[in-house]
Amino acid sequence: MSDPSTTAPAPVKRACDACHRRKVKCIGDGTKACKNCTSAGLTCTYNAIPQKKGPKGSRAKVISELRETQRQTNLSTPRHGFELEDSMQTPAHVKRSGLLSMEMITSCLDFFFANLYPTQPILHRVRVGETIGMMDNSIEAYCLVMSLCAYMMIQPNMLLPLNAFDGLELPPMPSLQLGHILLQEALRVRKGYNYVENPSVWTVITSFFFFGSYFCLDKHNTAWFHLREASTLAQIMGMHEEDHYQLPDLVESSRRRRLYWLLFVTERAYALQQHRPLTLQATINLPTLDEDPAETVELNGFLHLVNLFRPFDDTFVGLWNKSKTGCTTAYLAQLQQQLTDALPAYLHSTESQAVDLRCSQQWLRTMVWQLSISHGFLSSAATENTMSFKFPIEVSRDLVAAAGQYSQQAMEVHGIGLIEKLFDIACTLTDVMSCVPFEQYTFEYGPRDYLNQMMSLISTLRGGHQRYMPLLLSKINETMPSMPTPGYAIPAVPGGSRIEELYDGSQAHSSAPTSGDSTPFESPSLGSVGAQGFDFPDMSMGPPPTSAGFPPLMTTGGGQYPDLPVSTAPMQMYRDTSLNAYAGTVGPSKYETG
């Protein structure tokens, strides 16, 4: 006969821990989550050790209390591999206090709305203030504000007030260094809740700010990850469907619509720069100018930006990334025409938007030209300038003509994104100059002058002098070995190698600096360009520089940019007789003046 003490007792149904604490009947079988826990959103566990019924001694009472205390401690501590499900839990146990002062937050908001809002009109000032008030109770609000401040701190012209660090545990430090700290804090805290399963518009914006921060820090793989994350979260929310915007809150609906189109444009620009695929399509309506009468100018510029990038869909990106075939000259010529027609001669927009639009237009024209030459569609006898070898000279001329009207601050607001586009255009012009023969006349502007002016512009912009100028000079020395050191005019280089050999579809010359290198914002202070040796005396060929320190305008009014002021010393535009001979019979350029 077996010993009763060794016989396994029959299983006894008992209440789960949550039902036991709540003193309610547990509706379950002891193996799966009970209905009470499921409906209440609780984790159904059976960790408590049942106690025998009947009188207990003092020792048994103490042991029982200790066991219960330990059990509660274990239940309140997140186990490895599990996340907090409720983003509205107080982040006091995970956030790091003393990182941000209200002065810092206010400065970051002021900087965003003064500089970045026209091109990224996704926030509402009053609603952001409400979000700041929720930071102590909402992890999502906390991460959104942290990511916004990190994004602003990393901007090249961000300045903190003198009393910004008063009362904080952090010592005074540069805004860039503080931006790194805030970025890591937002990323760390965000891991404390499941933001993927139930994303909100705060979640999408936070991911976008992460992208912007890492893009400015030249961490392109991480930046792409967060941009794709923002796009995926937007699709999970249904932001790619028009029905998503049928909300009673018109402000919320309009900001969400703008957010989707901002992701749309950003993904296309970044896909071209980094050779990535697309995920977002033009499946919803555009914002309307009447949704906010106080922002008609900003919205008009934003709509121009969307229309500028809209033609660069899966077809072009697929051809660009060599994942599709079937490119035709008619398709590329149509794209060039769409780019020409995308922007009016006079832009009804803010200055910072105009900078982005004009530079992006010329950059996209360059990208289409690169695709044309990689497919062997260019001809020396082309009747269209866009299909000729000299087209990048025309693009450079238009870019330099447009750049002279803008202030340095309006250009630097766009950070390294704008500098990379200037860098790509300058590199393309360098390749053309090294392969296509041309003549330079004494009193006329030509490719050398456009390259000189773009070099001056890149070296003057914060982030361009220390990072991109050495790359551009290396490019020039590689393709034009006879070029003298900085400080001398760039010589005319006769045609040599075939230009098609430089464009095999990889666009290796226009790649941005690789990730992992030093940050581009360790540039010298503004106005110290000449002291650093990037001084181009041949710039004196034209009119005096503008007060902003940028190349002078090369227009006499009218033409493609009638909104530009008239130069104090009108000049005859570059007449490319040698290129005309090289390219065949081509009519006079439409940009030449009288």
Image: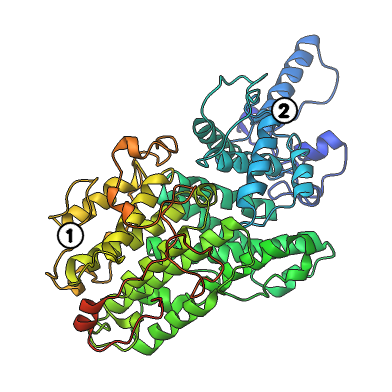
- What residue do we see at 70% from left, 74% from top? 242
Please state the horizontal and vertical placement of residue 263, each as a whole percent of the image: 57, 62
- Residue labelled with disc 1: 479
The image shows residue 553, relative to residue 210, as above or below, that is below
Residue neighbourhood size for the residue with mark 1, other residues' Cα within 10 Å, grouped as few (<14), some (14–19), many (≥20): many
Please tell me which of labels 1 and 2 falls first in the chain. Answer: 2
Horizontal arrangement in the rendering, residue 217 relative to residue 117 (left or right): left
Q: Which mark is residue 72?
A: 2
88 and 431: which is toward the camera: 431
Q: Secondary structure at mark 2?
A: helix
Distance Cα–Cα, label 1 vs label 2? 71 Å
* Furthest residue in direction front, as rendered: 569
Task: Identify residue type, mark 1.
Answer: Thr
Viewer can see residue 245: yes
**Badge nearest the viewer, 1 or 2:** 1
Horizontal arrangement in the rendering, residue 532 relative to residue 204 (left or right): left
Horizontal arrangement in the rendering, residue 220 relative to residue 348 (left or right): left
Task: Identify residue type, mark 2.
Answer: Gln
Residue neighbourhood size for the residue with mark 2, other residues' Cα within 10 Å, grouped as few (<14), some (14–19), many (≥20): few
Q: Secondary structure at mark 1?
A: helix
The quarter of the picture where the C terminus appears is: bottom left
Please state the horizontal and vertical placement of residue 502, each as a whole percent of the image: 21, 68
The image shows residue 19, relative to residue 594, as above or below, that is above
Residue 259 picture quarter: bottom right
